[in-house]
Amino acid sequence: MNKLKAVILAAGEGKRMKSKLPKVLHKVQGKTMVDWVIDTARSSGADDICVVIGHGGEQVKETLKDRNVKFAVQSEQLGTGHAVMQAGDFIEDNADIIVFYGDTPLITAETIKKMLDYHRKEDNSITIISAIVDNPAGYGHIIRDENGLFVKNVEHKDATDEEKLVKEINTGIYCFKGTALKKGLSLLKNDNAQKEYYLPDTLEIILSDGGKVNAMVVDDADEFAGVNSRVQLAEAEAVMRNRINRYHMENGITIIDPSRTYIDADAIIGCDTVLLPGVVIEGKTVIGEDCVVGPDSRLTDTKLGNGVKFQYSTAIESSVDDNTTVGPYAYIRPNCAIGKNVKIGDFVEVKNSNVGDGTKVSHLTYIGDSDVGERINFGCGTVTVNYDGNKKFRTVIGDDVFIGCNTNLVAPVKVGKGAYIAAGSTITDEVPENCLAIARERQINKTGWVKK
Ligand code: UD1
Ligand code: CA
């Protein structure tokens, strides 16, 4: 069997996106379009991948630097055939080469494998995927003879009025034998309406050269929808969102309202977790089993243990361990490790801090740059004062401390194990273990003062 390689065309400008970002770097469910295509190529069995770059090429290259792909540069966009020519030596005689577009993120490996099976079983020189669509305007039309055999592809702009009515279109996905691709490219001309070198012209060329060319018709054209505008980007996003949500539901996750649940491609979610409406799960977030997330919550690159309840809150680049509750209206900023059975209540912000098991931070509290022990009770309105306007300092609090309401802990400061802090204190000096610290003015009552 021939080895499998893939060429991904990503040199086009994508004018209609009206964007500073190269088109293929726009994201669908948190993953760039070209990354989706690379992943599909890989799961179809093509390890060796060449991405043809042009517009914004340096940026595409930089973004894909860890993806182990090769690059070819097309400095002038002279057509899809011309783009593949730039791959040069990457096209080997004894390889099967799949051509993808970088702006069609919805294609599945399942479909590609079907094409590949068909290609190899029929021993085709070229196999293309075609689809029947209601509105074929703008596509290449697939022309067949009276016996239904493939004759050629004709681009809409070059088609006769009769050909323009043909609803079988070229999806733009092909599998070539390396020899056929090389030969086809070497004979391409640009004598057409757009003065471009059309890749699909190689089909007719190879056919007349005695090769075997076949179109595999698929029912569902949605997979091949290219993204050319922000509207189409949102459409692709909706299709992908639906797929991802279905995948999780089929794996034992309850999603109350899939139309209001947004899960990035790389997220992992444990069994029997429930997602309530308005949940956004981003990046490499991992959620354990039996959690309830939402409503209206956002998790970015965050790890939740099992049995976590997380409502109306945000967490970024942090971890929250088993059976902890978060929210409503909590904000966990980057680099926090929240322990087990912790309570992070309403209007609590935690940043760059560790919070030990069983600690309760029930309301209106800021914990920044702190190492907080276990079983601590934070009174309402506690503030770690971590910033002197110039530098940030850490607060360290031992296990079993009780902090009264409205306490300021002015860092750098330490509170020893088992200590008590009286409500309203501003703590500037270390509090030793098991000690009661009171740092506020004593109350004075002036008898009869009001009447006087
Ligand atoms: C192409 C096909 C058409 C097919 C349609 C399916 C050709 C000539 N036509 O048309 O038969 O029905 O796709 O979507 O191939 N690109 C480059 N360099 C270039 C030109 C294009 O890298 O010089 C890339 C673009 O970035 C894009 C892809 O190739 O990702 C397709 O190019 P585009 O010009 O959009 O082709 P279509 O006109 O859509
Ligand atoms: Ca296109």
Image (cartoon, rainbow, N blue to C red):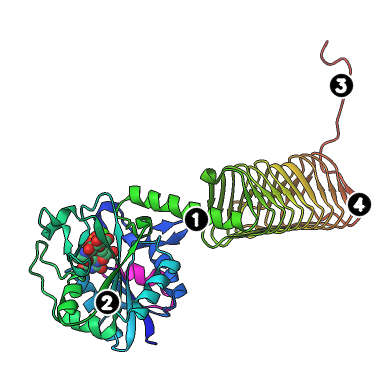
Q: From the image, state whether disc 2 or disc 4 is nearer to you.
A: 2
Q: Residue 334, can we see it? A: no
| Ligand 2, image quadrant it occupies | bottom left
Region of the chain picked out in magenta, as a range = 54-70
User: Three-letter amino acid code at disc 1?
Assistant: Arg
Task: Return the residue at label 1.
Answer: 243
Of the image marks 2 and 4, the number of the one nearer the N terminus: 2
The percent position of residue 39, horizontal first and vertical second, equals: 45, 70
Of the image marks 3 and 1, the number of the one nearer the N terminus: 1
Tell me how far mark 1 sits from mark 4, CA to CA: 58 Å
Of the image marks 1 and 4, the number of the one nearer the N terminus: 1
**Residue displayed at 16% across by 82% down:** 209
User: Three-letter amino acid code at disc 3?
Assistant: Lys
Quarter of the rendering occupied by the C terminus? top right
Query: Relative to residue 448, is residue 98 depicted above or below?
Result: below
Q: Residue 179, can we see it? A: yes
User: Three-letter amino acid code at disc 2?
Assistant: Ile
Quarter of the rendering occupied by the N terminus? bottom left
Q: From the image, state whether disc 3 or disc 4 is nearer to you.
A: 4
In which image quadrant can residue 289 be found?
bottom right
User: Three-letter amino acid code at disc 4?
Assistant: Cys
**Residue displayed at 41% across by 74% down:** 65
The percent position of residue 72, horizontal first and vertical second, equals: 28, 77
Q: Is 407 inside the magenta-drawn segment?
A: no
Task: Return the residue at label 4.
Answer: 435
